[in-house]
Image: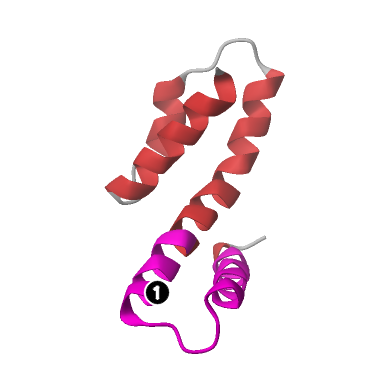
Amino acid sequence: MQPKDVYNIASKKVRRKLGENPSKSDQLEEERLVRRFVVRQSAKPVFKKIEAYDFVDITSLYEQFSGRDLTDRTCFMKTLLRTIT
């Protein structure tokens, strides 16, 4: 699945929750939820790899996400820690 497809799916899901005419704060919330959904979707293959190995080099996994903005990396690390603990 391409990142664009994941973003479109996330946008549709969030818009259904917010209704037809979202306010400005709802639009900001939509962007935040969509970004979180996209990060989770893009991180899933990495988490499948974690289950396959006993030892994971978290630094190299983190570097795969280093091109993204800080909120995405923070969300990734929190999800990663929840997954492996």
Residue 65 visible, this angle: no
Q: Position of residue 13 (x, y in %)?
A: 62, 70
Relative to 62, residue 69 above or below: below
Residues rendered magenta in the picture: 4-33
- Which residue does the numbered mark 1 point to in the structure image? 26
26 shown above or below 36: below
Q: Residue at x 55, y 77 (%)?
A: 15
In the depicted view, which residue is nearer to us: 15 or 45? 15
Question: Residue placed at 53% from the left, 17% from the top?
Answer: 56
- Residue 64 or 48: which is nearer the viewer? 48
* Side of 29 where 48 appears, left or right: right
Residue 13 visible, this orientation: yes
The answer to whether 20 appears left or right of 31 in the picture is right
Q: Main secondary structure of the magenta part?
A: helix
In what element is the residue under mark 1? helix
Instruction: Tell me the quarter of the image containing the N terminus.
Output: bottom right
Choose top left, top right, bottom left or bottom right for residue 8. Answer: bottom right
Q: Residue at x 39, y 66 (%)?
A: 29
Image position of 73 with respect to 82: above or below: below
The answer to whether residue 74 is left or right of residue 16 is: left
Q: State yes or no: residue 23 in magenta.
A: yes
